[in-house]
Image: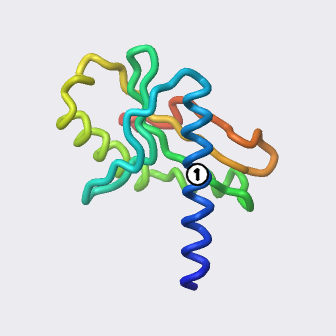
Amino acid sequence: MKNSKKFNKVIGNDGENRAALFLESQGYSIVERNYRIRLGEIDIIASKDNILVFVEVKTLPGGNAEILAHELGSVKQKRIIETAKYFLLNNRKYNDSLIRFDAVVVDLPGYPDIYHIQNVFSEFL
């Protein structure tokens, strides 16, 4: 079990690195990676064109759309939203930015190697 967790962490870190490189190639600036508070974590915080984007990265080489939907469920969304609020409270320079929640999915069978879903959810669900 311990090796499985370690393997998943390596896969996840690789996916996050690839997602960050992809976002940069699309003109985004990476503001922060692995932003953690007690309440939750945001994999990548990026900005582009006065939009601050909170990005959840999912590496799912053995997954499908149903697993992706489960991984981005309401509990996960709430944690990301609350963590984003905390980030914004402590980083007032982004007060005038538009806010968006995206997902970058890595290695999901049947999709591009890196699949960027903009506005994957919002606070008002």
Q: Which residue is mark 1?
A: 58
Q: Is residue 95 left or right of residue 68?
A: left
Of the residues shown, which amino acid type is indicated by label 1?
Answer: Lys
Q: Is residue 87 left or right of residue 8?
A: left
Q: Is residue 91 left or right of residue 114?
A: left
The residue furthest right is 110
Across and down, in percent, residue 123 comes to 36, 36
Residue 97, picture quadrant: top left
Closer-to-camera residue (20/59): 20
Across and down, in percent, residue 76 comes to 43, 53
Instruction: Please report the residue visible at 59 percent of the width from the left and 64 percent of the height from the top.
Output: 10
Across and down, in percent, residue 73 comes to 49, 53
Q: Is residue 29 above or below residue 76?
A: above
Label 1 secondary element: strand
Instruction: Please report the residue visible at 44 percent of the width from the left and 14 percent of the height from the top.
Output: 49
Q: Is residue 11 above or below residue 104?
A: below
Closer-to-camera residue (67/97): 97
Residue 103, picture quadrant: top right
> Could you tell me which quadrant the N terminus lies in?
bottom right
